[in-house]
Amino acid sequence: MMLEGQAHSGGNPLPVVTLGPTKRRLRLRDVWITRRVAWMIGLRDMRVKYKQAALGPLWLVIAPLGMLAALTIAFSGVTDTQTSGIPYLPFVLTGLTVWTFISASLSLGASVIPANVALVRRSPLPRIALLGGSMMGNLPPLGVLLAFSLAAAIGYGILPIQALLLPFLIAWLMLFTYAALLLISPIAVKYRDTLAIVPLIIQAGIFITPVGYGIDGAPATIKVLLIFNPATGLIEAWRWALLDLPNPSIAAIAIAGGWTLLFLLAGWRIFGRLEVAFADFV
Amino acid sequence: MPTSSEIAIKCENVTKSYMLGETASLPQTLAALNPFRATPPKETFQALSDVSFTVQRGSFFGIVGANGSGKSTLTQTISGITVPDSGTITIGGTILPLLEVGAGFSEDLTGRENVVLLGAILGIPASEVKNSIEAILDFAGIHRHFDTQMKRFSSGMRARLSFATAVCFPADIYVFDEVLAVVDDDFRERCTTEMQRLHGEGKTILFMSHDLDLVGSICSEGMWIDRGVVRTVGKIADVADSYAAGAQVD
């Protein structure tokens, strides 16, 4: 018994890895392998966000209500926006659901590598896990807003049958956001300029994205510009699925799909190419 | 004849440089845009120059060197955190690096949450993490604080939990970089006992320090690295002698 055990522990074949100069080491399966740690990093971000706050996770409900009130005053109160016959409350809530997830994910995700500098410089964790983790940290606000949107759509009795496509729409929203993060987050490691650009995109973006208004009421030239905003297509698709939006802009939806694919392919290349030097530059 | 299965770490001609100066700034951008003047190439600094050494499986290997000698760059390279400019490193077995006290811990999480997160970061299966928690608690001796946020920990408690987590998780090769510098004598004593226990179980241990006495007393073999260049590799006594002599000459 003893001898067997000793022989076993002595000749146990161990995994052998060779490390050397490389331009990229990221593999697609790293995304899958690191799903547990990505989830735990997301969980950490969720926990940390409301720790030492007297109202704690209640802010998940209060924050979107504040945005809802502001958008309603601006677009339904000051300017009487056109919503294709859909009641304003579910209309704005659906837009807010999509927009809040994209903007919150971008603002956290753009700086996710510098924010986790200790992990990047001192642990062998595949950095791709940090992206998924930072995005997952924004799932609770997405869930709250989605629940509000569904409740409003049901309350007004306008929830159509195509609402069954909701899982695909959520998957698309997450894929788009992940692709945008692949593209933008590695740049911040060398050039912190993105940390100045992203808040600008978010602050200006809510005015040039049909969150509080619909694109149908816009003049033709402005409408063309809005259609090239990737968030427009996503919101159009969501409003069609949850609120039966008549004549959703197929062009906007197709363009948003194109942006998603482009961001995904370009982002995967750029992230993988820059990831090898993260520890040296962060 | 040493076969590949008897080698834990093999570094062959590993070289790594870093760029000096700021990565990006407005003056640099303006200079790069100036078409009348070529941008001078950035200066580089060689942190590791042609480093070669082998650590046998089951060895307790010490690396000594002054601050800035390249020890940390070497551990980062071996742990797969950064990539060398040239050369190759072969690692036989799973590697668990502890490169800084508290690395991977989040201030706002509790001790327990941090241990579970660190386990996931190091790729330890969830069941193994669960099994290790009791041993980690015993070793760190912080039972009462385990469910308190890390920011309420003293630096000693943080260091104890950090070290306890590393030695209680399963791996074939353990890498410790200057981690015993901040703990008191009593805990350092227990840490060295624990490292010797791991060594007794056939684990490979790579221990970096600028503390020659400590390395000399616990390691059997070692290496002296000086400004990125390997000066001596072999029995720890020879390494210690040459390091002590060399440090005097400089």
Image: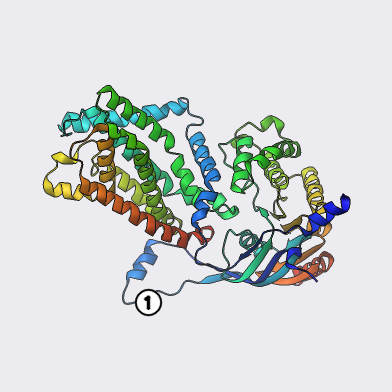
Q: Residue at x 48, y 51 (%)?
A: A113
Residue B6 pos. (x, y %): 76, 64
Q: Residue at x 44, y 59 (%)?
A: A190
The colour scheme used here is rainbow
Near-viewer residue (A171 or A207): A171
Residue B250 visible:
no
Chain bearing mark 1: B
The residue under label 1 is B38
Residue A243 visible:
yes
Furthest residue toward left? A219
Q: Residue at x 15, y 47 (%)?
A: A222
User: How many marks overall?
Assistant: 1
**What amino acid type should be assigned to the residue bearing mark 1?**
Ala
Near-viewer residue (B67 or A279): A279
Q: Is residue B159 above or below residue A159?
A: below
Q: Residue at x 51, y 67 (%)?
A: B20
Residue B5 pos. (x, y %): 74, 64
Near-viewer residue (B99 or B151): B99
Please state if A180 lies on the left or on the right of A278 as rendered. Answer: left
Quadrant of the frame with the C terminus of chain B: bottom right
Please state if B79 lies on the left or on the right of A166 as rendered. Answer: right
Near-viewer residue (A158 or B80): A158
Residue A43 pos. (x, y %): 51, 37
Quadrant of the frame with the N terminus of chain B: bottom right
Please state if A41 lies on the left or on the right of A217 as rendered. Answer: right
Residue A274 pos. (x, y %): 46, 61
Question: Helix or strand or loop: what does disc 1 sit on?
Answer: loop
